[in-house]
Image: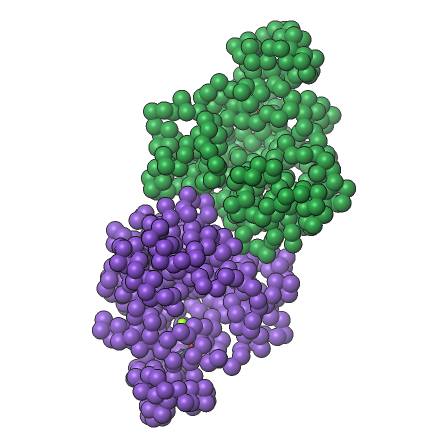
Chain colours: A purple, B green
Amino acid sequence: MRLLVLGGGQLALMMCWEASRLPIDFVVYDPDSSAPAFRCGRRAVDPFAAVEEADVVTFEFENVDVEVARYAERLGKLKPPLGYLLVKKSRLEERAFFDSLKIPTVPWRRARGWEEAVRIAEGMGRAVVKIPAGGYDGKGQFIYPREAAGFRGYGGDLLVEEYVDIRREFSLVAVRGEDGDVYFYPPAENFYVDGILVWNYAPTKAPEEAYEYVHRLVERWRYVGTVAVEFFEARDGRILVNEIAPRVHNTGHWTLETDASQFENHLRAVFGMRIRRPRLPPAVAMVNILGLSFERLPLGELEALGRVYWYFKAEARPRRKMGHVNIVAGSVEEAAAKARRVLSLIYGREFPKLVMRPRGG
Amino acid sequence: MRLLVLGGGQLALMMCWEASRLPIDFVVYDPDSSAPAFRCGRRAVDPFAAVEEADVVTFEFENVDVEVARYAERLGKLKPPLGYLLVKKSRLEERAFFDSLKIPTVPWRRARGWEEAVRIAEGMGRAVVKIPAGGYDGKGQFIYPREAAGFRGYGGDLLVEEYVDIRREFSLVAVRGEDGDVYFYPPAENFYVDGILVWNYAPTKAPEEAYEYVHRLVERWRYVGTVAVEFFEARDGRILVNEIAPRVHNTGHWTLETDASQFENHLRAVFGMRIRRPRLPPAVAMVNILGLSFERLPLGELEALGRVYWYFKAEARPRRKMGHVNIVAGSVEEAAAKARRVLSLIYGREFPKLVMRPRGG
Ligand SMILES: Nc1ncnc2c1ncn2[C@@H]1O[C@H](COP(=O)(O)OP(=O)(O)O)[C@@H](O)[C@H]1O
Ligand SMILES: Nc1ncnc2c1ncn2[C@@H]1O[C@H](COP(=O)(O)OP(=O)(O)O)[C@@H](O)[C@H]1O
Ligand SMILES: [Mg+2]
Ligand SMILES: [Mg+2]
């Protein structure tokens, strides 16, 4: 059994960790020769040849070469299907996709160039202006009017959306098998600083309609694998879909503490095996390690509170996801309390400085 | 943090899997260039240089080059201490070690050459004659009188011991930290066919004195790391220590289904971290995959019952440990029932032929 993963970041690395015990030939394609997943998987040099040689092709992030994915789809090897990747090539496409499925999302408009974006944003009062392609972890997003300088001069289409007064953010991580079986991991409540996920905990409550939206999304093109959907619960009560991630997701890293993680179930799904229901601990939390090199990591203390997962990135840059800590606890209160201790162990007085940097870069 | 593991078999491989998430440079020395652990760890070529460059040196089996281990001990890097390795160089030494600690073991005698062995065995009635060094999985052992031909002509010292009428076999896998903290995993009942472990389950009951013997063994030279002790419960009620394995152990593979496996706790111990108490499932079982290549593995069916761990050995030879299946269940009865299904999935009608081969080879 040979799997080709497009993209070699930490998501591919963790997938590879979970694949290690199985007789799977795990192949990774990433143009960056220092990609973390090469630590575990075998490196492919020619992506098209690798697609030909693989039994199954999947991806770990959205910004992969569409032509390679398209080739894999043509050979019947791409899981999840190409449609989900294509809508993620542009935030505008993604919003149109939600609209087409009648899934409520943040009120949005397409702007042709920065000047129109300013006009639309002005009309909304407070808005977020997003560059449609290539962004992640809050990159390419600008709060209007405060960060209006960030997109000044941008000539292409822009996504302009209402700035939502958010009560809480949560996500649903689910996995769908080839047989149509859908399993939802318990919902997680997610805490972002400046557009980047800093920590989360599970389980939290999610309203019925949130599950319904995910079902609608995965049934559209018969999704196969792990998927995540991010939600806003607005202060006025609206449940809004923020984005779909057609892949394993940072808000599901805590599932590594079960016997059927999002990574393992993704593998099971794309290889046509049945989804496994995990045994769940009472509560979990996850804390991202951002911008820190491992010499600065208080490893022993962190391991006393949880489990450290280190991504072995070549260089520690500000805001970069370098690793995370998973915490298991008897209650969500205990999980959150431990997460706070982990946050202060990692960031000390420097938190939130280490995390909060001007975004949009 | 750099760890050197002497020996690159499946035990080193699984240790490496468990180390993967941590910022540990995992180095393996094994003269066999096809050793499984090279799939995960970095290969050392010169063992003495590797000892110098490592922060900590440990071993995954007993038949490592003593001079390398001695050098690591001299540099203060060897964990567990050398004494435990030295007694394992010879089954005769090991028995003398048990005697010196007043730990009851199978009644035994040293024979100088095969003819004396025959005389002593004759006097015992039924006996087992064991070549002192280099044996594992029942290799180098001969039941007297049935297998007397196997050691005929052997000139060196032999271990001759009573053939025990065994009611059950169990083992204790424990881990001792540098701070002296000792944690015992729940005891496992182990099922051997022809000297080789075929499957086991946990938890089972172990008498108080068994724990006491392990304490005595690990305190002798202040053990650090994971250790296993195998016991016989004789039909006449005697609790006898069979052997000590100063390393991670096949009867503890089920601990991979917890959040603090024997492999992870071994790493924690040798790096001076605190031992982690695992959250335990109600019951587990483990089935060894012996002598099978993975093309013949009913992977999907096995994964529906448990988790397959594959060791990626270069070649499938009879009796060779190729992988194992871990099973989690709500009760030991359920675990055992699932283990039986896994056994028949793996071995079918060929069981027990695949497993039962003349030993002593
Ligand atoms: N319209 C908005 N109103 C308020 N906050 C927002 C809005 N859009 C994004 N955010 C904040 O920024 C975070 C990241 O935005 P998102 O669109 O998910 O970008 P990314 O693709 O980089 O994850 C969100 O989780 C949320 O905290
Ligand atoms: N004296 C004995 N009496 C009865 N069975 C024995 C005796 N010695 C070994 N065996 C059987 O053989 C198995 C392997 O023996 P052991 O000495 O542990 O060898 P190894 O080092 O190869 O594991 C034991 O677990 C037990 O089932
Ligand atoms: Mg997002
Ligand atoms: Mg033994």
* Picture quadrant where residue A170 is located: bottom left
Q: From where the camera sits, is residue A162 visible?
A: no
Q: Quadrant of ligand 3?
A: bottom left
In this view of the protein, which residue sits in the foreground, B184 or A263?
A263
Q: Is residue B166 above or below residue A119?
A: above
Residue at left 63%, top 45%? B44
Q: Is residue A360 above or below residue A49?
A: below
Q: Is residue A66 left or right of residue B204?
A: left
Residue at left 40%, top 65%? A61
Q: Is residue B253 left or right of residue A242?
A: right
Q: From where the camera sits, is residue B52 visible?
A: yes
Q: Is residue A196 above or below residue B114?
A: below
**Residue A318: x percent and y percent?**
56, 73
Q: In which quadrant of the rendered image does the N terminus of chain A lie?
A: top left
Q: Is residue B19 left or right of residue A202?
A: right
In this view of the protein, which residue sits in the foreground, A247 or B187?
A247
In this view of the protein, which residue sits in the foreground, B87 or B165?
B87
